Amino acid sequence: MNKLAVVALGGNALIHEKQKGTIDDQEHNVYETSLHLVDLIKKDYHLVIGHGNGPQVGNIMLSNMAGLKLYDLPDMPLDIDVAYSQGFIGYMIEQQLENALVALDIQREIVSLITQVLVDKNDGAFRNPTKPIGPYYTREESEKITAESSAVFAEDPRGRGFRKVVASPKPIRINNCRTIERLAREGKIVIAAGGGGIPVFYVKPGKLQGIDAVIDKDLALSMLATEIRADEFFILTDVPKVCLHFNTPQEITLDKITISGCKKYLNEGHFSEGSMSPKIRAAMQFIENGGKEAVIMNAAHLGEKNAGTRIIPD
């Protein structure tokens, strides 16, 4: 029987550090990542794929601001920006993954789904924005933008500059879970919950509406993995393994972490909120809700035995 896996593609799968993020850049990067995804497909995995969208949503917001300033075009709310990013990123992944499959003479259908995710409008995250989106700025640039727009910025934990941060409420429900599972178990490769999903809430019973936020894609995909009863959950990032004392002379790489170990390291402050911490929590959430194994790793090592850091039950 085929294993069902959910794969969360990090932002580096689309835009590498120091790239401008042109469509040519992104298509090339997605194709390279797709070749690694094929390694799982060769091992008879059924796949559901999600992706980040932080740089893309940030760029869409910048385009909106320019259009408003130069041409008096109507601004678009953040939930629409997320939907926009889901559409064009899903298209790129679908196309480049199909190209990778054809190059290797593998026949699989790929389906992209625009996905809404329910959140609580009273979630405390709306009072404490933490989710980084968009490009990196210097301190001076970020302070200037804040003075002009009241935007909130936070310093990148890896010293790459300052990024705008927005609310990141917890996902409550992923729409169309049963359809996603059915398609995946039929052998279709499903792209869903991109960027964590389009954040929506109930204005009143029976009436959904979008809300300004970006849901953490790893938490949303962890919930999706649980809902569709996935066997494994892969979180792809730009480092090969999870580390303690990251980027210091005392750095220690971890091959395996239990749930209790994750809690210990989180409490000790080893993982930053803007980087590894949400990934650890997402992996924990999947295991605590019955998942067999979560793996945090670099895409280049997909399919390799003992690659990445495995999060397992106690």
Image: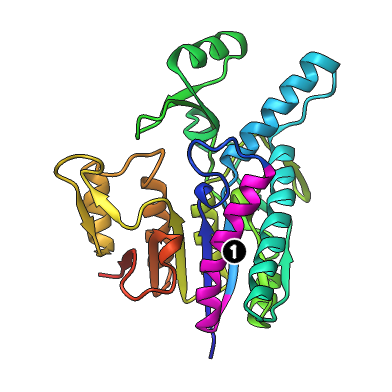
Question: Residue 76 vs residue 250: left or right?
Answer: right
Q: Position of residue 117 (x, y in %)?
A: 65, 52
Q: Residue at x 73, y 56 (%)?
A: 91
- The span picked out in magenta is 23-46
Which amino acid, by three-letter code, is at mark 1?
A: Ile
Question: In the figure, residue 33 lies in which quadrant?
Answer: bottom right
Dot 1: element = strand
Q: How is the image coloured?
A: rainbow
When asked about the image quadrant of residue 37, the answer is: bottom right
* Magenta stretch encompasses residue 40: yes
Q: Nearer the viewer, residue 261 or 207?
A: 261
- Name the one closer to the observer, 299 or 104: 104
Q: For this view, does 272 lie left or right of residue 21? A: left
Which residue corresponds to the image point at 50% horizontal and 30% vertical from the top-left? 129
- Residue at mark 1: 49
Q: Give the answer, above or below, for where 228 lies relative to 149.
A: below
- Can residue 189 be seen here? yes
- The image shows residue 36 at horizontal and vertical percentages of 51, 67
Residue 219 in the magenta stretch? The answer is: no
Image height check: is 114 above or below 233? above
The answer to which quarter of the image holds residue 94 is: bottom right
Q: Residue at x 71, y 38 (%)?
A: 81
Q: Position of residue 125 (x, y in %)?
A: 50, 35
Q: Quadrant of the C terminus?
A: bottom left
Q: Residues within 10 Å of mark 1 (few under 14, many from 20)?
A: many
- What residue is rendered at 59% in x and 40% in y? 214
Relative to 96, residue 163 above or below = above
* Predominant SS of the magenta segment: helix
91 w.r.t. 233: above or below: above
Q: Position of residue 194 (x, y in %)?
A: 63, 53
The answer to which of 194 and 219 lies nearer the viewer is 194
